[in-house]
Image: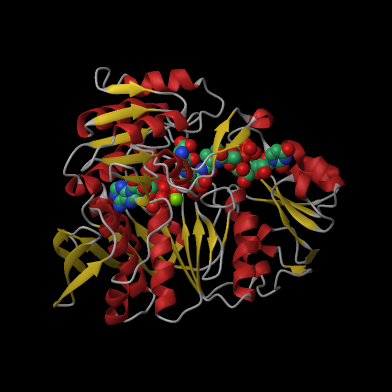
Amino acid sequence: MQGGLGGKAGDLNVTGFGVGAGDVRVTGFAIDNRKVAPGNVFGAFVGATVNGEDFIADAVRAGAVAVVARPEARAVIEAAGAIALVDDNPRRAFARLAAPFYAPLPETLVAVTGTNGKTSTVEMLRQIWRMAGHSAASIGTLGITTADETTYTGLTTPDIVTFLANLAGLAREGVSHVAYEASSHGLSQYRSEGPRVMAGAFTNLSRDHLDYHATMEDYFAAKMRLFDEVVVDGGSAVVWADDVWSDRAIGHARARGLNLITVGEGGETIRLIRREPGPLGQVLTVRHEGVERRISLPLIGAYQAANALVAAGLALASGLNPAQVFDALGRLAPVRGRLERAAINAAGAPAYVDYAHTPDALEAAIAALRPHTKGRLIVVFGAGGDRDAGKRAPMGAIAGAQADIAIVTDDNPRGEDPAAIRKAVIAGAPDRLIEIGDRREAIFQGTARAKRDDILLIAGKGHEQGQIIGRGPDARVLPFDDVTVAREAAGEKM
Ligand SMILES: CC(=O)N[C@H]1[C@@H](OP(=O)(O)OP(=O)(O)OC[C@H]2O[C@@H](n3ccc(=O)[nH]c3=O)[C@H](O)[C@@H]2O)O[C@H](CO)[C@@H](O)[C@@H]1O[C@H](C)C(=O)N[C@@H](C)C(=O)N[C@H](CCC(=O)O)C(=O)O
Ligand SMILES: Nc1ncnc2c1ncn2[C@@H]1O[C@H](COP(=O)(O)OP(=O)(O)OP(=O)(O)O)[C@@H](O)[C@H]1O
Ligand SMILES: N[C@H](CCC[C@H](N)C(=O)O)C(=O)O
Ligand SMILES: [Mg+2]
């Protein structure tokens, strides 16, 4: 395969597919037949909802000159008049074929996986790189963030064509360092394969997405593809050492021979010795290469300290020097929608907006705020529709046990009946949870109940700007922003 075609029309060497030595002249790549342009290579993949192979004829009619698909699809491709590039793993083959076409890509590319903390970690790493003088970007749930702007993209890990096009665009703008979120969906669908990933990080693993992955083992295996296959030979693996899955993640990194960087109380590379919460942040004492350092992290919560240290591990892996990295942690700016202080009500009680939408995350967000709460901790939360239903009762149980007042409300019901979702959440702590379906009303009531010394936590939507109702073509996004509503409830003028 040749490289360096710069995202422009060019010859693509497809000898690796055994279709003869002839090069195919292509103009680009597409994985959706509706986006095929003349001269494109079409990737036809068996999906969770439909089989992309059913669209091969349409794609060729739209101008696809070659199709990457399973060997079973060869006859269909050839009958349609295109070159068949068949492989037992067509998503991976497509990614590897496409990546060189989009070159040059940013030189330093790292990925973060884990159930919680990916967005925070890539965003913190982007900030550290920038403070060290690099032109940096992050790609993930918040979209594409550079020093100048954030462009929302929709998925946490974009599809492979969007991902490669975005990387090429960033490189053209002069961005040299990119950190991206590797979601388990993204990893299992090879959405970011192909470019050279010099380091990967694992934050933690807990219940989520078991609608998509059959078991926790399958979910973990999807995540571990990052260390097993995606990071380049000789690359680095950063592992948060204090999670129950950490030892197994370390095992994957070792088996692959990656440079291992472990971080946390049980970490060997960056050992967290002490964490002292303060009113607006926390002081961390860490040991790295025999040197003990005190870091005034301007963010609250054990979970934010964990993410900052994983980001530090990746920054070291990317070649920054320790002084640069640890100094930068003292100057990190908050991540949008992660323990974001949104409003203060008339009684003086603050409201925090957080993106906790898993049982573990809810527990972490409550634990982050507890040391700051002299009075009661009030939580407004919900669980998403058309997502892992098994996390609902555990979320209810955690809020019921760990908050003083817990209000269950709606959070993107999508194609499901919102009352049924709330019922499943309430089953986790039937006597402890208050049900208020309308999210605005729930935030208003939570705010009204918060007295002096209390804290209100509004969990689940973080940065999100809408409430998703309905499924497929009927889906609608009703504008909704927890921060704005929290301010309105507190009587603050926008
Ligand atoms: C379950 C899932 O991950 N679905 C995503 C995935 O679907 P899939 O490959 O299984 O696709 P499919 O819809 O069955 O279609 C199969 C193939 O046919 C193609 N197709 C389909 C229809 C058509 O008319 N023509 C056509 O060519 C599709 O492009 C696809 O290649 O590929 C599609 C195209 O890239 C994505 O839009 C779609 O995201 C859906 C909308 C989604 O909601 N995904 C969520 C669950 C998701 O991916 N979340 C993760 C994790 C979030 C986190 O925890 O951080 C994320 O990374 O965002
Ligand atoms: N290291 C962590 N440990 C436990 N909980 C965390 C951690 N980091 C973040 N959280 C919780 O998870 C929420 C989401 O954090 P973040 O957006 O950084 O994670 P993510 O992995 O990107 O999530 P998503 O899978 O939705 O993209 C936070 O608001 C917080 O409640
Ligand atoms: N990336 C996560 C985001 C969940 C956010 C929450 N607000 C919800 O809708 O469940 C998912 O797609 O499962
Ligand atoms: Mg994310």
Indicate left or right for 218 with 473 as reference.
left
Residue 143 vertical position relative to residue 195 in the rendered view, above or below: above
The residue lying at 31 percent from left, 19 percent from top is 427
- Left or right of 305: which side holds 209? right
x then y, percent, for residue 173: 62, 75
**Vertical side of 141 occupied by 333: above or below:** below
- For the residue pair 336 and 18, the one nearer the viewer reads as 336
Residue 288: tell me if it is visible: yes
Splitting the image into 4 quarters, where does residue 402 fall? top left
Which residue is nearer to you in this view: 159 or 119?
119
Q: Is residue 114 visible?
A: no
Q: Residue 328 lies in what quarter of the image?
A: bottom left
* Left or right of residue 13, residue 284 in this image: left
**Image location (x, y in percent) of residue 384:** 46, 32
Q: Nearer the viewer, residue 413 or 171?
A: 413
Picture coordinates of residue 8, whole percent (x, y): 76, 70
The correct choice, above or below, for 299 with respect to 410 in the image is below
Looking at the rendered structure, the number of numbered marks drawn on it comes to 0
Colour mapping: secondary structure
- Where is the N terminus found, in terms of image quarters? bottom right
Residue ID at (37%, 30%): 445
What residue sits 18% from the left and 77% below the top? Answer: 289
Please state which of residues 41 and 430 is positioned toward the viewer in this rendering.
430
Kindly identify the residue that appears in the image at 26 percent across and 56 percent down.
Answer: 300
Q: Position of residue 137 (x, y in %)?
A: 51, 68
